[in-house]
Amino acid sequence: MMNRCHAALCCSFAAFSLTLFSLALPASSAEPHKLAVITYMQETCTFCPGGDTQIEDRAWRVPFVMGDDLIDRKRGFIGGFVHAAREYPDVQVIGINSPDGVYGGSSRSWESRESFEHFMSIITEDLKANMPVDGVYLALHGALAVRDIPRPEAEIARRIRQIVGPDTPIAGSFDLHGNEDEQFLQWANAAFVTKRYPHYDASLQGERSARFLYRSLKGLYNATTATRKPPIITASVLQWTGQSPSMDIMERARRWEAREPDAFVSVFYGFPWSDVPDVGATVHVMTNDDKALADAIADDMSEFIWRVREPFANGVFPMPEEAAKRTTEAMAKGAMPVVLGDYSDRPGDATWILKALIDEGVSNMMYAALRDERALAALSARKAKPGDPFDMSVGGFTGEQAGKPVRIKGTVNYFGEGWGYDEIAIIEFGDNNLLFLVPTYTQIRTLSPLRIEGLNPDDYDVFVVKSRVHFRRGFDETGYAKTIMVVDAPGDWFGTTRLDSLDYQHAPIDRLYPFQNGDNRN
């Protein structure tokens, strides 16, 4: 009969061929190794209006995510982690009660200290109840911003370390938009960061985290790290890994990993809408007990990012009126569908491009989607139904950045549950145009959400989405759209590439390219 060690090798062989880990499994112990899974994610826009995120903003669906439900996820960081961890017959995955996602996503401002302490208590109490554990996996984002806690992810790792002790390996996975420095790795052993934007490789980073923990607890990997922070800050619209120099940066990281066995190279681009002290780019390198190699790779990556700083941190996009004119020109040439990414709108209610397209007389358009909870409340109050007339000013209510409300006269096409919300509306107006109204910022990534209530997006020529890069997943990198434009907005406020107009209180933007004075690499 095949022994347990041999079985582990057989069931893991295909996965090992896809990873840089080379693994020889010792015999399994009588008791399974317990790996705890925890998540606390948020991409925090501290400049966004609406007030701090409170407990109820994370409890809008459930008070918290039960541990068993957490590890039942099939995709993303956690799905990848669980998939890889369960390849080992001597591993038991334990889900730890964790906070749910925030209502409004990355349009929400600071996490309140009360909310952070509340959910950290839920995490730590459940972790203590499941002790002892042999390893901990933290599925994080990296751009969580909490009142009075400068580096929340490092603080999460610190509190977990206090519970599990100094010898239990801790690994974290992150979004490349995270703001991090060396402090997370003072408490955790490893960090694995997505290398693609859109983030196709989240599950891969979860898988790497699982294999790292397993090798570490078996004594086969001694994590040795190096961190560098090239002093560069970039708007997320410039970070698409389908174009240079962002593509080149991540390819350089992958090349190092391919050349050096057991080396892992992670690059954070940073999230500039979080006013935190560790904002901006970061390089983490991990090797298996080779500090000199870790330092050499980290130096090379940091220097390369600095060399390509000019195209990486600067970009110009058409304003709404120009984008509307280009849209009609593309339609006249038959270069459709046309997709417009309204990149700067974080709250979700900006009307700049909507007004410009209406003024230009654009037809056959899907605008998905405009945030207006007030309009939805009015529709709900009158028990709106398909076929009802619609005549209302929508959007443009969160301040100057949003423009002015735009009057839409048309017909209710649909009103009811959709996209995970209790109420959304689809308004038909103009010449075969559809306007989707939603209660909070909603980013459309693919065509799938638009196939609602019998609608076929293939019947439309123009799409407007509130997205910087993620929309490329469904509209660009599939070859669907013939014309793609990222659209700017007038004015100096959060969301645009004009970061120096923001009133940073904690982030050292005056020391970061392109807003610094002189060469501040040291």
Image (cartoon, rainbow, N blue to C red):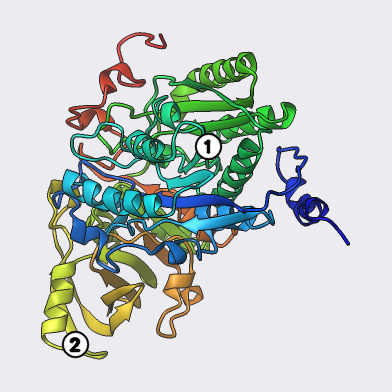
Give how far apart the Cα atoms at labels 1 and 2 are. Answer: 55 Å
Residue 34 x/y as whole percent: 55, 51
- Please rate how many residues cluster around mark 2, counting C-alpha atoms within 10 Å: few if below 14, some from 14 to 19, many from 20: some
Q: Which mark is nearer the camera, 1 or 2?
A: 1
Q: Residue at x 65, y 19 (%)?
A: 290
The residue indicated by pointer 2 is: 384
Residue 358 x/y as whole percent: 26, 64
- Determine whether, in the image, residue 80 is placed left or right of residue 9: left
The amino acid type, in three-letter code, at marker 1 is Pro
Q: Nearer the viewer, residue 132 or 199?
A: 132
- The disc label shown at residue 318, or none: none
Q: Nearer the viewer, residue 191 or 412?
A: 191
Above or below, 295 relative to 507: above
Task: State the image quarter where residue 180 is shown.
Answer: top left
Point out the image quarter for the N terminus: bottom right
SS category of the residue bearing label 1: loop
Above or below, 68 relative to 505: below
The amino acid type, in three-letter code, at marker 2 is Ala
Above or below, 430 relative to 322: below
- Determine whether, in the image, residue 490 is placed left or right of residue 81: left
Residue sitting farthest toward the right: 1
The residue indicated by pointer 1 is: 169
Task: State the image quarter where residue 74 is shown.
Answer: bottom right
SS category of the residue bearing label 2: loop
- Determine whether, in the image, residue 216 is placed left or right of residue 336: right
- Determine whether, in the image, residue 411 is placed left or right of residue 200: left
Q: Counting residues from the N terminus, which is met first, the one under dot 1 or under dot 2?
A: 1
